[in-house]
Amino acid sequence: MGNTESTPTPPQPPMRAGRRRQTSTSSPTQSLDEKFDAIRIDHHPHTSPSSHNVLSTSDTEHVSGTQTIQYVRDLLKDNKNRLGLSALSTANPSSVLEIPSAILKDTQNFNLSIPHEGTPVTNQRSSGRCWIFAATNVFRIAIQQKYDIKNFELSQAYLFFWDKVEKANYFLTSLLDTAEEYDVDSRLVSALMASPVGDGGQWDMIVNLVAKYGIVPQTLYPDSWNAQNSSTMDRLLTTKLREAGLKLRAMRKDGASDTEIASVKEEMMQDVVRILTLCLGPPPAANEKFTWEYTTTKHQVKTASLTPLDFAASTEVKKFISLVNDPRNPYNRLLTVDHLGNVYDGRPITYVNVSAQTLKQACVAMLRKGLPIFFGSDVGKMSDSQKGIMDTALVDYELGFDVQLGMSKAQRLLTGESQMTHAMVLTAVHLDQEGKPVRWRVENSWSVAAGTEGYFVMSDAWMDEFCYQAVVDPAVVSKEVRDVLSQEAKVLPLWDPMGALA
C-alpha cells in the first residue's frame, strides 16, 4: 500500500544443480495471477506419494510415531515442500501466501458513498468495545451535521460504564432465576458464568443503553486508562460476580426470603459500581443537564445545555432493526438468544434472518439514503489488518500447504469455525455496471494506523462468507421482511454462535 517502504531486491543466489529451473514465458501483458501460476511447481515432481501412513496400519485409532517420521522425510524430498519449509517456518504464513492481485484490486475507490463520514477515526485500544465504537460512530454523523462540527466523538466510556452495571445486574438476576431449575455445572449456568460482564455486545444492547441513559460528548466523559485497557478491571469484576452469584444461588436454595436476597444483591451491586467508578470515573447523570462547548466549521464557539437523554434524541436508535445471515436457520425467520442481554427486561436480542442477497440489498439502499450501517462480522478470517483488506481471495493456503478449505458458511457456524467477532461501519460501496456490489468501504475503530488511515476494503465475496449482521432502517426492506418482526422468535441457546458478542 501507499505507506509501505520500498526495499532493494537482494542479489539472487545462483541456481544449484538438481534444483528445478523455471523458464519464464511471461509477457508484459500477463496479469499478476498468470505470472504467479507460471512459477507454480508441480506437486511431487520427483517422488511418488509416500507409502508411509501417519496412523498405525494395524490400529487406525492411534498415531504411529515411526511411520509419521518416515512420512515427513518423504514429504521433504519434494522441492516444493523444502521451499515451503524455508518460507513458511520463518514468517507468518498468511503474509507469505498473500496474492498480489487481490491487494491491487481492493482499492479505496467507490461510486456510492454517504455524503459525510465521521471524523476523526477512533481507537478502541486494548478493549473489546468495538460494538460501542461502531454504534457511536454511526450516531455521531447526524450530530456533526446538526451542530456543524468537523471533528467529534461521543463518549464510548459512558456507555461502557452503564453496560457493565447493567450486565452485572442481568447476570445476578439470571443466576437467581435459574437457581432451582439448573445446577451450577449445567450448560446454561456454565455459559452465564463464562463471561458475566465481557466487553462485547450487540445492537439491541446499545438500544437499551441509549434509551435508558442517553449519550454524551467524549470531552465530558473521556476514556480512562481502564477504559482503554479493560482486562484487569474485567477480571476483578468477573471474579467478584461469580462469587456473588454462587452466594445468591445458595441463599435461594436454602429458602432465604426475597427481602434477604435483595439486600445481599444490593450490596453486591454496590461493589460493582464502586469498582467501575474508581476505574472509569463517575459518569454524568442521564437526567441532569450538562454544558458542552464546541467549535463549528465556521470557527464559532457555541454552548449547548441538555441532558444525555435529550442529546440522544437525534439517534432514532429504536427504529432500526438487525438483519442477520445465518444459513443454518430458515430465512425470513425471527431469531433470539436465550439469556443474552444487558438491561434486565429490556429490549431482547432479536435478529431477522435473511439471505445474504437481501442483507446486501438493504445495505446498498441504506447507503443510497446517505446512512451509515452498523455491521458484525468475523474480522480475523482472510484479512490483513495492516493493509486493511478483507477478501476471500487474499491468501492462497492451497499453494503453500497443498490443502483445500471448503466449508460452507453454515458448516463454519455449526463447527465453531466462525462467528461474529467484531463490529464496524459501512460507509460506501462500489457497484458494477449491473448494480451489483464489488467491494465495500469499512470504517474501523483500530486507529489511523490500521488499513488506509483507519478504513478497510471488504470484497463482496468476503461479505457473503463472513458478514453476519447489518443494522438497517426497516424502510429499506420489503414488507415480507418487516412482517418477520411480528413472528414468535425461535430461541437459540446462549452458547449458539449467533449468541457471540461483537
Image (cartoon, helix red, strand yellow):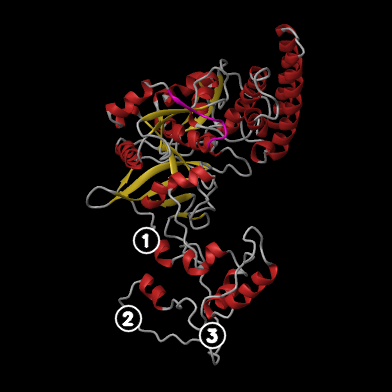
Near-viewer residue (328 or 484): 328
N-terminal of the two: label 1 or label 3? 3
Q: Residue 132, located in which quarter of the rendered image?
A: top right
Write the residue at 41% across / 24% down. 316
Q: Is residue 35 above or below residue 461?
A: below
- Mark 2 is on which residue type? Ser
Write the residue at 48% across / 22% down. 311
Task: Give the image location of residue 433, x and y in percent.
Answer: 22, 52
Task: Quote the CA–CA distance across marks 2 and 1.
Answer: 20 Å
Q: Is residue 491 magenta?
A: yes
Are the residues tagged 1 and 3 within 8 Å (C-beta)? no
Magenta segment, which residues?
489-496
Instruction: Kindly state the secondary structure of the residue where label 1 is placed.
Output: helix
Q: Is residue 488 magenta?
A: no
Tell me if 373 is positioned left or right of 18 in this view.
Answer: left
Instruction: Kindly state the secondary structure of the residue where label 3 is placed.
Output: loop
- Mark 1 is on which residue type? Lys
Task: Give the image location of residue 480, x and y in percent.
Answer: 29, 28
Instruction: Kindly state the secondary structure of the residue where label 2 is placed.
Output: loop
Query: Dot 1 corresponds to which residue?
Result: 105
Query: Dot 2 corresponds to which residue?
Result: 27
Circle count:
3
Query: Dot 3 corresponds to which residue?
Result: 12
